[in-house]
Image (cartoon, rainbow, N blue to C red):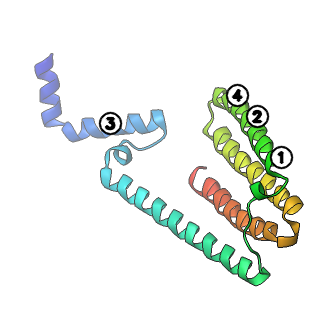
Amino acid sequence: MLFFVEFLMEEKGSLVQEGFAAIHTELYGYSFEAVTNKDIWRGLILRLFTILIILFLLLFLIEKLIEKFLGVKRRRISETPGKSVDRWGRTIILIIFLVVYFFALTKGSVDTLKWYWVLFLTVLAGFQIILEWKYLKESKQYISTLISSTICFIFIIFFVIRFYN
């Protein structure tokens, strides 16, 4: 029997491999060649890092321009009476999202998890903006944070919709 399988692989190796790849694609929903081809993965990772670097540079430049235009001097919330509110709020948000994360994992859906992370980042940024508005209102720092967070979320949602649907 082993001899017959080896003979089949030698004679019709490409057909067997193509059949295996077709079965794998049908079962798992992605191409087997795409997973095994290191050049494809390297290209994807390189493109992802390039996009992330461009995004961070763009956000940094936009934030600095807005701060210069509005005359904002950066301060930390920990330097204000809102220090304890900031710590408690972030801790409560983290605990709630860790508990919800386990329920999101039981759904087993990648779609659920990706929107979970988008929601988590949105809540954290929203909390940061509200605290800056309340405790650093005179510096208008919250406007800079609001604009940069909005740009970041537009990019994240575009990335989630474009690449994960």
Question: Badge 3: few (under 14), some or many (20 or more) residues near its Cα, within 10 Å?
Answer: few
Drawn side of residue 14 relative to residue 51, left or right: left
Which secondary structure, mark 4? helix
Give the amino acid at mark 4: Phe
Question: Badge 1: few (under 14), some or many (20 or more) residues near its Cα, within 10 Å?
Answer: few
Cα distance between the residues tagged 1 and 3: 60 Å
Q: Nearer the viewer, mark 2 or mark 3?
A: 2
Drawn side of residue 132 relative to residue 158, left or right: right
Cα distance between the residues tagged 3 and 4: 38 Å
Drawn side of residue 57 relative to residue 31, left or right: right
**Which residue corresponds to mark 2?**
96
Cα distance between the residues tagged 2 and 3: 47 Å
Mark 2–mark 3 contact, CB under 8 Å?
Answer: no
Cα distance between the residues tagged 2 and 1: 16 Å
Among the two numbered marks 4 and 1 on one chain, the one whose residue lies closer to the N terminus: 1
**Which residue corresponds to mark 4?**
103
**Which residue corresponds to mark 3?**
19
Q: Nearer the viewer, mark 1 or mark 3?
A: 1
Residue at the spot x=37%, y=48% of the render?
34
Give the amino acid at mark 2: Ile
Give the amino acid at mark 3: Gly
Image x and y of residue 59, in percent? 63, 70
Image x and y of residue 56, in percent? 57, 67
Residue at the spot x=60%, y=73% of the render?
58
Residue at the spot x=74%, y=74% of the render?
73
State whether residue 112 is above or below residue 128: above
